[in-house]
Amino acid sequence: MKPIRTFLVLIISSVWITVSGQNNKEVHAMEKNDSMKVIKNDEEWKRLLTPMQYHVLRKKGTEYAFTGKYDHFYEPGQYVCAACGNLLFESDTKFNSGCGWPAFYDKTSSENIITRIDRSHGMVRTEVICAKCESHLGHVFEDGPPPTGLRYCINSAALKFIADHEKK
């Protein structure tokens, strides 16, 4: 019985050490990412954003279809988060999906956007969130054009456009 108990103690200790090491790595990675986060309280966001931007970005609202300023806008440049300036989309990935909101078939970087399951309004969708300030941007669907087959359906109020000629 004693060899079995010793064996179990060794196994449990080994698993604990492995799990603890992984948790420490995850914590360090989270600390590194968190240092880049933009964190503001609700009053600061209200002062920084327009009422529509606040509604969309911070309260997960949406604009009415076909009303956003970037729906039929196709100038060369980049689209950044209206709340924090995080680079989200390039104009060469924008397309006219006919959905009533700006649509992109790809994001600039996987590190700049987070996706989460959204079960609101009796639907199951994939929410698109800014990784830097955790603002709601819109949703992504799997009915877009090649090469990705994705359609990032994004609120104009969540975006700020920077024209190619304005880049530093």
Image (cartoon, helix red, strand yellow):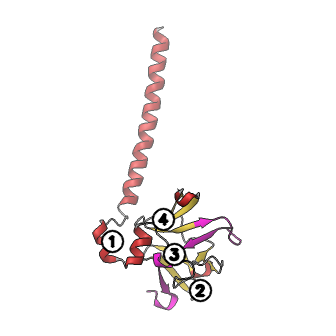
Q: Which residue is mark 1?
A: 45
Q: Which residue occupies 59% across, 87% down?
A: 74
Mark 1 belongs to which amino acid? Answer: Trp
Side (left or right) of 134 relative to 139: left
Q: CA distance from mark 1 to mark 4?
A: 16 Å
Q: Which residue is mark 2?
A: 72
Q: Is residue 83 above or below residue 33?
A: below
Dot 1 alpha-carbon crowd within 10 angstroms: few under 14, some 14 to 19, many 20 or more: some
Q: Nearer the viewer, mark 2 or mark 4?
A: 2
Mark 2 belongs to which amino acid? Answer: His
Percent coordinates x, y for residue 123 in the rendering: 58, 58
**Contact flag, marks 1 and 3 (Cβ < 8 Å):** no
Query: What segment is highlighted magenta in the picture?
Result: 140-168
Percent coordinates x, y for residue 91 in the rendering: 58, 82
Point out the tag, 3 or 2, that comes first from the N-terminus: 2
Mark 3 belongs to which amino acid? Answer: Asn
Q: Which residue is mark 3?
A: 155
**Contact flag, marks 2 and 4 (Cβ < 8 Å):** no
